[in-house]
Structures are given as C-alpha cells and as structure tokens.
Image: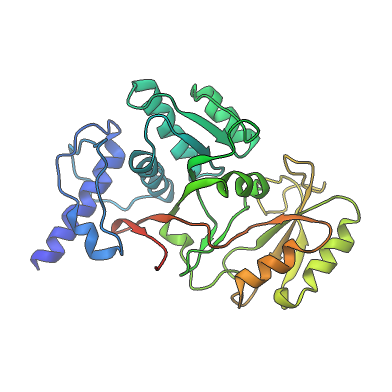
Amino acid sequence: SAFAGEVASTCNLLMAWLWNGTFRTLSASLSTAAAFTPTAFKPSSRSFSVTTSLNMALSQDELKKMVGYKSVDDYVKSGMVVGLGTGSTAYFAVERLGQLLKSGELEDIVAIPTSVRTKEQAEELGIPLVTLDTHSKLDVAIDGADEVDPDLNLVKGGGGALLREKMVEVCADKFIVIVDESKICDGLGPGFPVPVEITPFCHEHTLRTVGNLPSCAGCKPVLRMGSSANNQVDGDEIAVTDNGNYIVDLHFEEPIKDAVKMAEQIKSTVGVVDHGLFCDMTTAVIIAGSDGISVKEPSS
C-alpha cells in the first residue's frame, strides 16, 4: 500500500541519517513518525542531510546513536546547564554535545557529569564542566535507562552510577530518557535487576534487610562483584562505586507490583544510599526502533 511504502521510505531515510554523519540539512520528510508515536516526531532546527538509502537493519549501537543525537538536537539550547548521563546510550548524547560546541552551533553551555567516565569523555571533547555545588538547577538532563514501563518509571544503574545520576537528574527542569526499543517493558523487574547502592558497613545485613522488604517479595538479592560498571560477575572482589559504596542487584521473576511503594521502602532502609528506581521523574522518552524514532511523554 501507499502507506506501507511511505513508512518504508521513512525508515530508509532514518538509516541513511545515521550512516551519513554530517547532520546538516534535512532533505526528506519524517512526518510518518506520527503514525507510530504518541507525540509526533518534530525535526530539530539543527537538521541533517540524507544522501543515500541503506536497506539493512540497524544495530543496537546505531539505534542508540540516533536517540542520543536527537536528544541534544531537540532539547539543548545555548546558555543551558546540562546533566550528562552515564552508559552506552548517554555516551552518544555527550558526543553530540561536544560536536555542536566545537562547531559553534551551541555556546555558553556548562554540564554536570554523573560519573567519572562521563567526566573523562566530556573533558576530552572540551565540554565545560561544573558541579551541583555551584549549579543546583539544571535546564535539562539526558540519560539512558535499563528498563522503561508504561508509566515511564525506570530502572537505572546497570552501569553503577545510579546515585550520581539521580542526584543530577532530579535537579533538572526536564529529564530526557533515551533508549532503544529493547528497553521498553510491560513491568519493571524481570527484564533487568534493580540495583541498590548500599554502604560497605554490615553490607550483608543490609542485603538481607532489603531482600526481606514486603514490596521486594520474590526477589533474589545479589551482591555485585567485579566491575561496578555492569551487573555481570567479572571479578572476585566486591564491586565498588565511584562513591565507595557497594551495589546489590535485586533479581525478579515477576513484574514489580508497585514500583513507587518499593522505591519508598528501599530508600527508607537504614544502610541504603539509594536505588535504581526512577519514578515520576521522566519528561519524555525518545525511543529508537526498527520503524524509526518515537517520543513518549507521561499521560496527563
């Protein structure tokens, strides 16, 4: 049908954008994105050139690059204070911010990184950095997520930076989440363990206490070992965060019944520093999928 052809054409244009890399002048309409998104796709004033069509499936990294670049193009303006997230998707948002600062398309930007590795990347790109000590109010924060539920509640912290991410992102007027479609779920929990940052002091006691909370019923708490930057066992030593703390990953076989209640109970547990449930914080989620880019916002 004509509609199917139009959607296919749009997908090809999106794939060509990613491979082109110049991101200069928009030469093709992306209006059909409205067919698969609650919020119509609105091209940024910073447009890009589409010079060729590629009939191939996009890799997960290519999808991450699409949403990372779009988040900066659409939500960052000169003069802003920007929160920089941590992880494989946020990496591309930081990269794009550095590009636009270098080209002069953005000016007078200062940014707050949420981890040591994001700080190092931003410094390499020449992005001016500050901290919450001098800038407690942010215009926008951009970060990825490990899971996103229908209410736009998130699981974050797979990369071990959950405390700094939450401290920065809760201070932002807008919190933009960037994901590929694999992170969208019907309920938080089974698809990705919920990380909880705890103090090293009596950490086994805190692990048991969290695991026994009524809202965490059915979970299996596992102390993160090896690198704090992932939840895979890749070493014999206990993983240590940038803040000198430990992480307990809560594994669920069934969806969490009440993420907000669980977040409150975990946070109120003595010995817990913070957790990876980000509830009622999201301004918009930019999603890259096989059919293109869509944007989802909280229901009013």
Look at the image and tell me whether residue 251 can be seen: no
Classify 30 as above or below 258.
above
> Which residue sits at x=77%, y=44%?
240
Q: In this view, does 38 lie to the left or right of 127?
A: left
The image quadrant of residue 265 is: bottom right
Query: Residue extending furthest left?
Result: 2
Q: Is residue 198 left or right of residue 48?
A: right
> Which residue sits at x=30%, y=33%?
21
Residue 155 appears at what percent x and percent y? 58, 60
Residue 62 appears at what percent x and percent y? 38, 45
Residue 73 appears at what percent x and percent y? 34, 39
Q: In which quarter of the image is the N terminus?
A: bottom left
The color scheme shown is rainbow
The image quadrant of residue 217 is: bottom right
Residue 270 appears at what percent x and percent y? 83, 60
> Which residue sits at x=24%, y=38%?
45
Q: In this view, does 205 lie to the left or right of 100?
A: right
Q: In which quarter of the image is the C terminus?
A: bottom left
Q: In this view, does 71 lie to the left or right of 218?
A: left
Query: Residue extending furthest right?
Result: 202
Classify 36 as above or below 138.
below
Look at the image and tell me whether residue 194 can be seen: yes
The image quadrant of residue 248 is: bottom right
> Which residue sits at x=48%, y=64%?
152
